[in-house]
Image (spheres, rainbow, N blue to C red):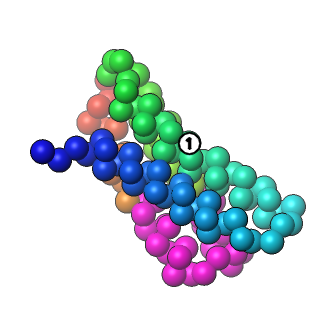
């Protein structure tokens, strides 16, 4: 039996870790520091809130947590777009991160529609 919740817990956590590892080596500047903090916050929020969603006590709580996950994943995608425009990391790596984030947003937004109370 496939456990989709575990698969997405792993995917969201892996995405957050990849983002942290890609941005950590970039030299400090005020602008980079702000972007790094924001994207790390949003990507780790995706992972932690998805995990919380899996433990929800009710369908309403599940829907609320999933809504947060979709919002934070969309914000992560926004910060990746900013990083792309600023050429802060390699294009191939960035494309991989953006593709994975887009897949997560699409899948979880569809799941949220099915849960809508």
Q: Which region shows up in magenta?
A: 78-102
Label 1 Cα neighbours within 10 Å, binned few <14 / some 14-19 / many ≥20: many
- Circle 1 sits in a helix, a strand or a loop, which is it? helix
Indicate the position of residue 110 as horizontal and vertical percent values: 31, 46
Question: Which quadrant of the rendered structure holds the C terminus?
Answer: top left
Q: Is residue 77 visible?
A: no
* In the depicted structure, whether residue 40 falls above or below residue 84: above
Residue found farthest to the left: 1
Q: Residue at x 54, y 63 (%)?
A: 18
Q: Residue at x 80, y 71 (%)?
A: 27
Indicate the position of residue 38 as horizontal and vertical percent values: 69, 51
* In the depicted structure, whether residue 75 falls above or below residue 92: above
Question: Which quadrant of the rendered structure holds the N terminus?
Answer: top left
Q: Residue at x 38, y 51 (%)?
A: 10
Residue 79 placement, left or right of 74:
right
Q: Residue at x 31, y 50 (%)?
A: 7
Mark 1 lies on residue? 45
Residue 58 placement, left or right of 38:
left
Indicate the position of residue 68 as horizontal and vertical percent values: 50, 36
Residue found farthest to the top: 57
């Amino acid at each position: 039996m496939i456990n989709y919740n575990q698969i997405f817990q792993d995917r969201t956590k892996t995405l957050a870790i990849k983002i942290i590892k890609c941005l950590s080596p970039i030299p400090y500047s005020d602008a980079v520091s702000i972007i790094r903090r924001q994207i790390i916050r949003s990507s780790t929020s995706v992972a932690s809130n998805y995990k919380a969603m899996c433990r929800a006590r009710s369908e309403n709580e599940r829907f609320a947590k999933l809504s947060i996950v979709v919002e934070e994943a969309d914000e992560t995608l926004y910060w990746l777009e900013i990083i792309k425009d600023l050429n802060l990391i390699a294009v191939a790596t960035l494309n991989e991160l953006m593709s994975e984030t887009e897949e997560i947003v699409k899948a979880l937004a569809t799941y949220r529609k099915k849960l809508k109370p």
